[in-house]
Image (tube, helix red, strand yellow):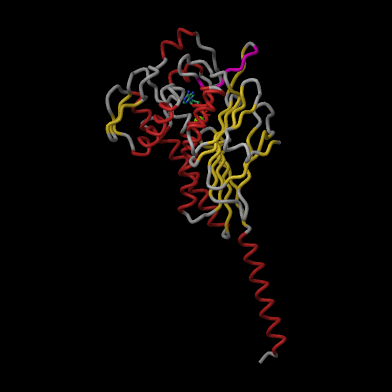
Amino acid sequence: MLNRPLSLLLVIGLGLLLLWSQRDRAASEVTRTALIMGTLVEIKAVGSDENKLEDAINNAFDVMRRVEAEFSPQVPNSAIARLNQTAETSEIPSSVRDLVELGEQVRLESNGAFSMALGGVKELWAIETENPQVPTREQLEAVLPPLDSPALLLDGLIARRSSTLVRLDLGGIAKGYAVDRALEQLRDRGLRSASVNAGGDIGVLGGHAERPWRIGIQHPRKQGELLATLEARDQAIVTSGDYERYFERDGRRYHHIFDPRSGQPASGCQSVSVVAPSAALADALATAVFVLGPEAGMRLLEQRSEAEGLIVAANGEAIVSSGLKERLQWR
Ligand code: AMP
Ligand code: MG
């Protein structure tokens, strides 16, 4: 038998050891990156078991790759590619239907500024290729889809383009959706703390240890520098910027967010960051607000009670929605 002081010491020692080991286990954070949807995607996961975190992250990347295949107009036989090839109806997965319905809501709210029908315009600019070019006004007018109709006509899961000028392109909303699906996968795997950053489309699950996640908003004119940060739990922050994909010709910047009325790059903003409960919604709103410009864009954000935003206007002025003012920390 041990004497009392000794056994007490042993118990205290074991207790400390246990505390120490748990503290160590709880502190694990795994960060991985992968190239998906033409973007470097970074996932961070916090938890006690590194192998489990790593597995969950790999699964989340797989989910994002499936979203990429499902929504890319370039992937032959994807639902989007099939619709673009025919004037007839075709059946679509419910995931595509749901996302198209969300996009359609944002199209209506933004008076057509958000459009999932601009694939033809995007192709003319060839903005994502090695040889981007400035199309003529005539060329653009020949491919502009009708302004006041939805991209797709839906009857349950049976869909058809509303016009043959519609070339479906969900590039303004699909990355956010992929972020949501990745977070859902991480949550289903039992994680309670994670972040997914797909090139500035960011979603976070829970907080970061005891604190909220601190999220940085890229400065639209200072590469690699932050404009502001904010704290968030279980939220998404998505940025649309004219610095993301662009080329310059004759001293002008041509970027990838188009005004559906003209097919020209929208000129009212340098960047728009939207905070919302889901990254898909934040993504669509950020693109819509960018096209609308600072005034009409801020009105749209103030109408949506669950969304907040920061607009950097073309002249560099920053405008913040009422619910975000207190939360932003400027850099
Ligand atoms: P984001 O970076 O989310 O603003 O999305 C930009 C991408 O959305 C572009 O690369 C196009 O694929 C697509 N896009 C361009 N203009 C629009 C628009 N007015 N509405 C919706 N999507 C658009
Ligand atoms: Mg967007």
Residue at position x 66%, y 23% in the image: 316
Q: How many marks?
A: 0
Q: Hey, which quadrant is residue 161 in on the image?
A: top left
In percent of width and height, residue 270 lies at 61, 24
In percent of width and height, residue 15 lies at 65, 74
- Which of the two residues, 253 or 57, is positioned nearer the viewer here? 253
In percent of width and height, residue 55 lies at 51, 53
Q: Is residue 16 above or below residue 191?
A: below
Residue at position x 40%, y 34% in the image: 102
In percent of width and height, residue 198 lies at 55, 38
Residue at position x 57%, y 57% in the image: 47
- Which of the two residues, 312 or 251, is positioned nearer the viewer here? 312
- Which of the two residues, 53 or 104, is positioned nearer the viewer here? 104
Rendered-image quadrant of the C terminus: top right
Q: Is residue 180 above or below residue 319?
A: below
Q: Is residue 92 above or below residue 269?
A: below
Magenta span of residues: 251-258
